[in-house]
Image (cartoon, helix red, strand yellow):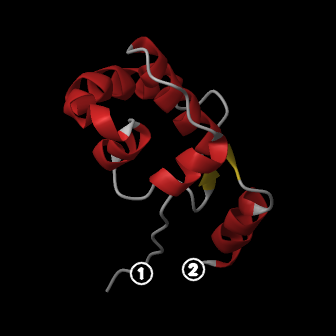
Amino acid sequence: MKNGILFDLDGTLLDTLQDLANSVNHALRTHGYPERTLDEVRRFIGNGAEYQIRLSLPNDHKEDLQKVLAVYKPYYTGHCQNKTRPYEGIPEVLEAIRANYP
């Protein structure tokens, strides 16, 4: 029997919010839509990129979802490590687990 520990990185071990918000706002700007605040983007994450972009678009422009998403995805892929960092204390916790895990 093998033992292991699984972690969710995005939003659990890593603070990805600023890179997500920057990517959302880039995609919105590209299509002439108003940007979203960091708090708004925080509320929109958790159910995938399509859901995040759908909530970010103004209510009367949901038909542009796929166009905005097509800008968002490659932008985020290229910029997802600009501001992303482990939450405070996470590297130490992971090191302690590594050192004490058989």
Q: Secondary structure at mark 2?
A: loop
Query: Is mark 1 in CB contact (under 8 Å) with mark 2?
Result: yes
What residue is drawn where x is 42% and y is 13%? 30
Q: Nearer the viewer, residue 58 or 13?
A: 58
Q: Nearer the viewer, residue 73 or 24?
A: 24
Q: In this figure, which residue is indicated by the disc labeled 2?
A: 102
Q: Position of residue 15 (x, y in %)?
A: 64, 49
**Amino acid beneath label 1:** Asn
User: Cα distance, mark 1 to mark 2?
Assistant: 9 Å
**Is any atom of residue 78 visible in this view?**
no
Rate crowding at label 1 as few (under 14), some (14 to 19) or many (20 or more) other CA atoms within 10 Å: few
Q: Position of residue 45 (x, y in %)?
A: 46, 53
In the rendered structure, find residue 38 and report the number of the disc placed on it. none
Residue 99 in which image quadrant: bottom right
Choose mark 1 or mark 2, whichever is in front.
1
Q: Quadrant of the C terminus?
A: bottom right
What residue is drawn where x is 56% and y is 35%? 36
The residue most toward the bottom is 1
Q: Is residue 61 above or below residue 43?
A: above
Task: Please indicate whether residue 33 sits to the left or right of residue 50 in the image.
Answer: right
What residue is drawn where x is 24% and y is 27%? 64
**Amino acid beneath label 2:** Pro
Q: Is residue 38 above or below residue 43?
A: above
What residue is drawn where x is 35% and y is 80%? 2
Q: In this figure, which residue is indicated by the disc labeled 1?
A: 3
**Is any atom of residue 83 visible in this view?**
yes
Rate crowding at label 2 as few (under 14), some (14 to 19) or many (20 or more) other CA atoms within 10 Å: few
The residue most toward the front is 60
Q: Quadrant of the N terminus?
A: bottom left
Residue 59 in which image quadrant: top left
Q: Nearer the viewer, residue 55 or 49?
A: 55
Q: Nearer the viewer, residue 12 or 64?
A: 64
